[in-house]
Structures are given as C-alpha cells and as structure tokens.
Amino acid sequence: MIYKYRDKPLPTNGLPPGIPYIIANEAAERFSFYGMRSVLLAFMTVHLVQPDGTPNCFGEKEAEAWIHLFVGSAYFFPLLGGLLADAFLGKYKTILTLSFFYCLGHGCLALMGIVGETRAWLLLGLFLIALGSGGIKPCVSSHVGDQFNQKNKVLLSKIFGWFYFSINLGAFASGLLTPFLLEARREVGTIGNSIYPYVRFLVGSKDYGEVIFGSHFAFGLPGLLMGMATFFFWLGRKDFAHIPPRGKEYFKETFSGENLKVIGRLSLIFSFVVIFWALFDQIGTLWQIQARSLNRVIPDGFPLFGGVEMLAAQVSAIWNPLFILILIPIFSYFIYPFVEGFVPLSPLRKIGTGLWVMGISFIVVSLIQEQLDAGREISVFWQIFACFILTASEVMVSVTSLEFAYAQAPKSMKSMVMALYLLTVSLGNYLTSAVKFLIAREDGSSRLPGAQEFWFWTILVFLTAFVFLFAAKKYKSQDHFHQ
C-alpha cells in the first residue's frame, strides 16, 4: 500500500505539528457528545413527545438504564474502530469514515418529533452515535501517541493531560449551553425578546412560559459541532504521522503468545477501572435525579451565576468539566511533583488512590440523599463539593489510565489496546444498566429507594479499591513506543 502522507513520527525533541489539530478536533467532538448526553435524561423523562404532541416519556429508572446501555455501547464499538485502524484502514481513514455515521446520528436526534415514531428516531440516532463515537475513540487517543518518538516521549504525559483538558473544555461549554437550548423558557410578563434572561440559563417553575428553542436546537447544535470536529481533523492531514495498518500481519502479531500475555496483564488492571466507570457515569443519571430535589439557586453575589437557579442537567455537566480544567494543571505541575518528592508515584499508585477518593465522593452524595429522604432542604453546593472530589478521582484514574494503556500496548496494536481500555467504560455502564433494570419495579419505583442505592455503589467502590492494592503489586510494567 502506498501512503501519500508521512508514515513515521518526526525525529524532533519538541511538540509534533499535528497535535493542535487533534486537540481542536477532540474539543469540538466532545462538545458534540457530552452536549447530547447532558440532556438525554431530561429529554427522555420530561420532553419526549410524538409529532402530534402526545407524551411518550420514559420512567426515571428505565431512562437511566437505557442511557447507561447507550454509553456502554458507545464504549463497546472502540473494538471495531481499533480493528479497522490497526489492521485495515489506518487511524486517519477510520476516523473520517466513522465520523460520517456520527453526524448522521445527530441528524436523527435533531429530527425527532417532526415525523414518525419518536422513540424509533431516538434509538436509531443513539445507535449511530454509539457506532461513530465509539469507533473513533481508540483511534484518536492512539493517534496522539503515534505522533511521538523516543526523543520527545517525555512530553507525552503532559500532552495526554492537555488532550483530556480539551475533552473537558468541550464538555463544559456543552453542559452550559445544551440544557439551556432544551429547556429555556420565555419569562412571563417580559416585554419584547430580551435575550438576557435566557443567557442566565434559568428555568423557573411558575415564572416562565413556553419553551424558546427545544430539542431540535439542543440536538442540532451538537451535530453541527461534530461536523466542525471532522473538518478540524481533516485540516491536519499533512502534519500527521500516518502509521500504516498492519494487514494480515496484525492478526499474527495480535494473537502471538507475547501480545496475549500483555493483554492478559492489562485486563487485570482494566477490570478494576470497570467499577470506576460504573460509578462515575452516574453523574449524568443518578446524581442528576438527586439534583432535581436540591435547592439549585446560586446565592446573590456569587460570580457570574449569582441569583440563578441552575438546571438539574447542568449541575454535573458544568462543574465536572470545569473542575477538570482546573485540576489537571494543578495535579500535573504541583500535586504530582510534590508527592514524588517523598514517594515514587507510579501510574498504578495514582489509579489506586483515585479509587479511594471516588469512595469519599459517594459518601458525600449518600449523606445528601439521606437528608433529602428525611425531608430536609439541601443546597446544590453539597453536590458540587462531591463533584469536586469525584473529579479529583477522575484525574487520578481516567487520565492516568489513558496514558498507561497506550504506553503498555505493543507497538503493532496501539488502537486495539486503547479499545480494550475504553471497553472498561462500556462494561462499567453495562453493569450499571443491568443494576438499574434489576432494581426498577413495574410501577416505576426502585427496589433500592433513596439513599440505599447510593450506599450500594459506595460500598462497591471501597471493596474494589481494597482488592486493587493486591493486584497492583503483582503487575509488571513494560513501555512500548515507536522509534
């Protein structure tokens, strides 16, 4: 196969030239995905109607289960994308091809409620987004690593940090704007069309009238951003290192004894990360439902948001990516260097610590739910505080696992190992979905009502963190980079 573009990393000590295009692509693509995902629960439980206006909503636990099934599928299709990239098309062509299905899925969501069965459009759109989004995930992250060589690999850790930073920059912007597009309402008594009340993204219960924008805008904007993401990526084609696919050799090397041993060792570590994702992704479901019962009014005098009532869908969708933007530089440039002055800080030690920290965040939301169950009013700031702790665990587990997976992967199967890592997100969400379906009663109630479900997940993650201590001691690390 003849390649039109450069097929090796540049032998430079500095930043590879293609990195800015990948970062821009990732920021726009993540806006697309997280923007759509942030409004799914509200749309499915409150706003889902047929074209004639007949309500067609899901129950809360049913909607939670379907959303986790969708997210699980979005992180299952990386197996397909990794196979296409490493064996047949290469990462660049795989990303461009599957991005088409991604955009088509957003189009299906934007057309919901205009014609046909709304739930059918919803499920078709979610399937296409899962296929496109999932298929490109391992290719984009491993494409970052492919731009580096032995001379500049020391920059990889910081670049993966900034890569993750771009993900959450896009997620923050979409979490701020997309729920507003779905639920913003015209203020009753307002004369004219002043935009000021809408920019403050407030949706009151009795002081506001009809919806201004709606689902077509809320789902259409993420689709537009996905088109922009594809365009950004195409712009960098001449600056990328296009590592050729291996063809038939890929299968021989993948199933060689040594590679299977590497996959086996990594799978042991990945199995613990499954539990992390089973809990973490509930900030968009279980935590969002809890947020509906919180006092979400931000006190007057608070910068930017003072006097505003946040939407339940915005709480974690805004604060989690915002905290990521703050904490990644703090961890990379201050906390990690400070701790390493006293003890060696290996990737596995970071991951293990992150699991314990996640347990603390779930203790906080469990206690919040106990207060709500007792009929007490709780400020949204307590959930924001829990979100801050959860985000610290995300930096230690998710960012580190991304770098760790690439470094440990054999050179011939970088995308496939990244796909196996992303499978941890899939399995975690499938686990959560199964639990949600199991505890949901036919009348819409839960077999683990109120705080009971929160404590169930809290105990599970602490048990996982404890067992991980022993698994990490047995793991033998070995890095693999392109020359």
Image: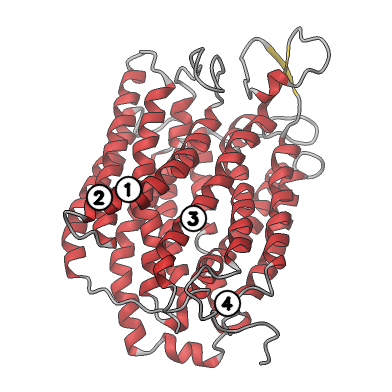
Q: Which of the 4 quarters of the picture holds residue 263?
A: bottom left
Amino acid type shown at disc 2: Phe
Judge whether residue 57 can be spotted in this image. Answer: no
Foreground pick, 127 / 186? 186
Label 2 crowd bin: few (<14), some (14–19), many (20+), radius 10 Å? few
For label 3, the SS is helix
Q: Considering only order in the chain, which callout, 2 or 4, is on the residue closer to the N terminus? A: 4
Give the CA separation, mark 4 to mark 2. 39 Å
Q: Is residue 148 visible?
A: yes
Q: Residue at x 33, y 35 (%)?
A: 453
Q: Please determine whether, in this image, residue 110 is positioned above or below residue 314.
A: below
Give the Cα distance between marks 4 and 1.
37 Å
Q: Residue at x 63, y 62 (%)?
A: 21
Provide the residue designation for mark 3. Answer: 162
- Which residue carries the number 4 mark? 85
Q: Is residue 95 above or below residue 393?
A: below
Say which of marks 4 and 1 sits in front.
1
Say which element carries label 4. Answer: helix
Measured as percent of width and height from the top left, residue 101 is found at: 70, 62
Residue to which mark 1 is pinned:
334
CB atoms at circles 2 and 3 under 8 Å apart?
A: no
